[in-house]
Amino acid sequence: MSGIIVLDTNVLIHDPNALFNFKGDWIIVPMTVIEEIDNFKKGVDEKGRNARQISRYLDKLRDQGSLQKGVEMDNGSTIQVVMSKKVQTIANDVLLSDEKDNLIIGTALFVKEQNPDKEVTLISKDANVRIKADAIGLKATDFEADRVNFEELYTGVSELEIDSNLFDKFIENKTIEAPSNDLISNQYVRLSDKNNPEKRIISRYHVQDNSIRPMTHYDGGFVFGIQARNEEQAMALDLLLDDDIKLVTLIGKAGTGKTLLAIAAGLHKVIEENKYKRLIISRPISPLGKDLGYLPGTKSDKLNPWMQPIYDNMEILIHSHGEIETEREGRIFHKRRPVVEDYLDQGWLELEPLTYIRGRSMPNQFMIIDEAQNLTPHEMKTIITRAGEGTKVVLTGDPYQIDIPYLDSESNGLSMSVEKLKEEEIVGHITLEKGERSKLADIAAKHF
């Protein structure tokens, strides 16, 4: 046994499979954790589903042995549920409270007393729990199994200087063999001439034949009324318009245009090219500030406050795209500006909260998940696996703007998707750097 791990409730609620992530360790689940999971299990949200999954895992382990004594797993770890009257005494003596968090810390201290020769580590996603544990001499860490280094997160773009002869060959043949093995599938390359750095072409790496070729899916023109304002936006549109790319991830601060670009490409593909049956746009329902509480009315009425950012982007695009003709008794009688409801009525567009996506199968759809940084890796997996044959999924978000407890820029589902899926041939990613909403929005995004 290499060490003893004590798990906090939030780790298991975040990822039920965390129970099996510690190979060769002795895993302690405090009885307080079981009680907290019992309180969560009746919920219909992701937290409730995860709580029920944990209960099923632990109940199944009972078939293999006694959880009181510890059940040995195939990966060499042992899982044990610990309950002792001494736990509350220890918690009260040290922390002067019988709160749930302190009882979990008390369990870790109890286990440490029982195993003085072993290293005991409390794993929690709650920073305050880790601080309290450290203050009383107990080792505590965050759950690291599903984290990435955000400062080194893949951007989707690289710089490459080549000699003049090779650059001229690229201009002539529209392709060259990649000069190094450092490039990633569908990575964009700012290709420049060593002798004349001003000569530069945006190109893309194709892993299938190890070649670098110019962008072919976006030529700089208008896409449903808008066009790229910078190089990163052009690269993003190139990915969004490529039907062979089935998953696109766009990361950027507020105002970089990630959502607008995704919706424009989706409407273009659905309405103008008829490549997909409909455009589905969804986002997590998480308020900024105090929750509005219960909202009366129909499903549409309830969704309006949460989907308003989508409506704002849709109105920009629809007004940019132009007028539509309306018919009465078989005759076109006037032209008018279209509205979002026209696209909803035609079946081209569907707005759904993520609550309703679980369990669905979505073939041949263009699906956008906005504010994807507010999803856990487990939720992200659930959403991406909804994609049926022919469906394209676009994830947009800003990992610095997270509204969900226990998630951060390194552990959210969007960052994990970028890093874990970057090598796949049908996946592409771009990090948008330059704000284009307005000069004021760009200043705010930089300085706050």
Image (tube, helix red, strand yellow):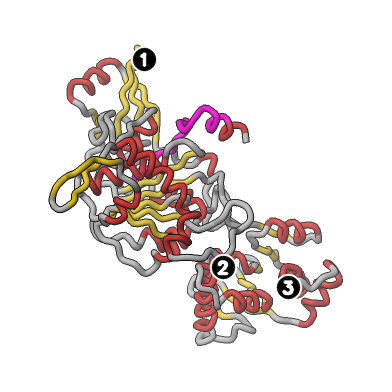
Residue at (32, 16) in percent of width and height: 199
Quadrant for the N terminus, please: bottom right
Disc 2 marks which residue? 13
Which is closer to the viewer, label 1 or label 3? 1
Q: Is residue 103 above or below residue 151?
A: below
Start-end of magenta stretch? 428-443
Q: Is residue 77 above or below residue 83?
A: above
> Can the viewer see residue 212 in this picture?
no
Q: Which residue occupies 24% across, 49% down?
A: 270
Amino acid on which disc 1 is placed: Glu
Rounded to the nearest angstrom, the CA distance separating label 1 from label 3 is 64 Å
User: Disc number at residue 384?
Assistant: none
- Residue sitting nearer the eye, 124 or 270: 270
Residue marked by disc 1: 198
Residue at 70% across, 81% down: 83
Residue 168 within the magenta-colored segment of the rendering = no
User: Hey, which residue is sitting farthest left in the picture?
Assistant: 330
- Using the image as rendered, state which of residue 419 and residue 243 is in the foreground: 243
Q: Position of residue 156 (x, y in %)?
A: 39, 38
Compare residues 214 and 77 and report the one nearer the observer. Answer: 214
Give the mark, 2 or 3, whose residue is nearer the N terminus.
2
Q: Give the CA separation, mark 2 to mark 3.
A: 19 Å
Q: Secondary structure at mark 3?
A: helix
Q: Is residue 238 visible?
A: yes
Q: Position of residue 96 (x, y in %)?
A: 85, 69
Q: Quadrant of the C terminus?
A: top right
Mark 1 or mark 2, which has the lower sequence index?
A: 2
Q: Nearer the viewer, mark 2 or mark 3?
A: 2
Q: Which residue is mark 3?
A: 107
Distance of label 1 from label 2 (alpha carbons) = 52 Å
